[in-house]
Image (cartoon, rainbow, N blue to C red):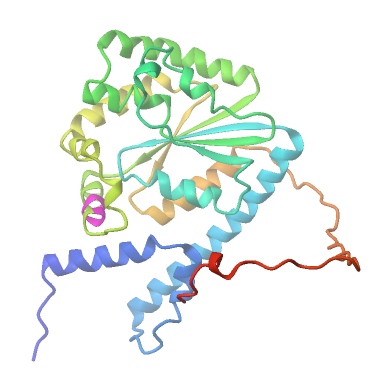
Amino acid sequence: MAHSEPTPDALLLQRIQRELIDDYDEELEMEREDWDPLDPAGPAKHAERAARLTYFRELFRLQGELVKLHDWVVATGHRIVIVFEGRDAAGKGGVIKRITQRLNPRVCRVAALPAPTDREKTQWYFQRYIAHLPAAGEIVLFDRSWYNRAGVERVMGFCNDEQYEEFFRTVPEFEKMLARSGIQLIKYWFSITDEEQEFRFRCRINDPLKQWKLSPMDLESRKRWELYTKAKEVMLQRTHIPEAPWWVVPAVDKKRARLNCIHHLLSQVAYEDVGHEPITLPKREHHSDYTRGPIPEEIFIPEVY
């Protein structure tokens, strides 16, 4: 009896299931490889597994280089700002997670600012971002940035034409000031297709753990794809300056985008290996008058697992 071809809905469900698995933590995903030894392993399955292992191998290698970069930044007092922009569901958060995953959060931190308060709306536009700029020996990753004005605020009508034009007059000077002060600014735009954004939105709708990512603003932005495209093109044209050029990350394939972005980021900083003294664990001191006091049983959490 001939097997019928999967329906488009069945194929979509299979893609969504694979997508959900891919979004789990990398170490957990690697362990998952051995969960089902009876799973049929045809050529396609072997190819998929080989591709996944290559991804993890490269990811861990690049994360090792990020640790070296991190150590060099601390040792030299270098300051780095990395701006991540792109449409909703373009993969910005995924690459930020992989960059920060192995690093000290006191050295490499993420700034993801909410919508401005009524008070902040009366301030100089860049004022609320300045507080998050790095001190010596710090890296700050902006998950969206001052470029909100050129994107979402323009498209959704949250700024007027005068404010929009003033942003473009000011932002090159603002970024040149950052560069003159010694801050290295790196700007990434994550580029996805119309079809891929729709697919990722559908994945979020079907994943209870990610439905919080779909705000009414995200859904409204989906309708205004063409306006966002026009706003992006104007933004790239008017704010691509030698002191802080834009870099476009093709992001339809999320794993390739992560690896390519991290690889490029590492190439932008002339970091070097920093020597470390060997670490010796000191012996614990014992004192004859030390006794451990009792802890009340009622303050222990239940051991459910």
- Which image quarter is the N terminus in? bottom left
The outermost residue toward the right is 288
In the rendered image, the vertical position of residue 241 relative to residue 256, given as above or below: above
Q: Quadrant of residue 247?
A: top left
Residue 53 appears anywhere in the view: no
In this picture, residue 130 sits left or right of residue 13: right
In the rendered image, the vertical position of residue 232 relative to residue 214, given as above or below: above
Give the percent coordinates (x, y) of residue 251.
37, 47
Q: Nearer the viewer, residue 9 or 251?
A: 9
Q: Residue at position x 61%, y 67% from top?
A: 296
Give the percent coordinates (x, y) of residue 186.
52, 32
Q: Nearer the viewer, residue 86 or 131?
A: 131
Q: Quadrant of residue 256?
A: bottom left
Give the percent coordinates (x, y) of residue 70.
66, 44
In the rendered image, the vertical position of residue 170 relative to residue 280, given as above or below: above
Give the percent coordinates (x, y) of residue 37.
41, 87
Residue 182 appears anywhere in the view: yes
Q: Nearer the viewer, residue 114 or 91?
A: 114
Q: Residue at position x 58%, y 70% from top?
A: 297
The stretch of residues the image draws in magenta is 200-204
Main SS of residues in magenta: helix
Q: Nearer the viewer, residue 186 or 46?
A: 186
Q: How many marks?
A: 0
In this picture, residue 36 sits left or right of residue 8: right
Q: Would you say residue 241 sits in the magenta stretch? A: no
Q: Quadrant of residue 287?
A: bottom right
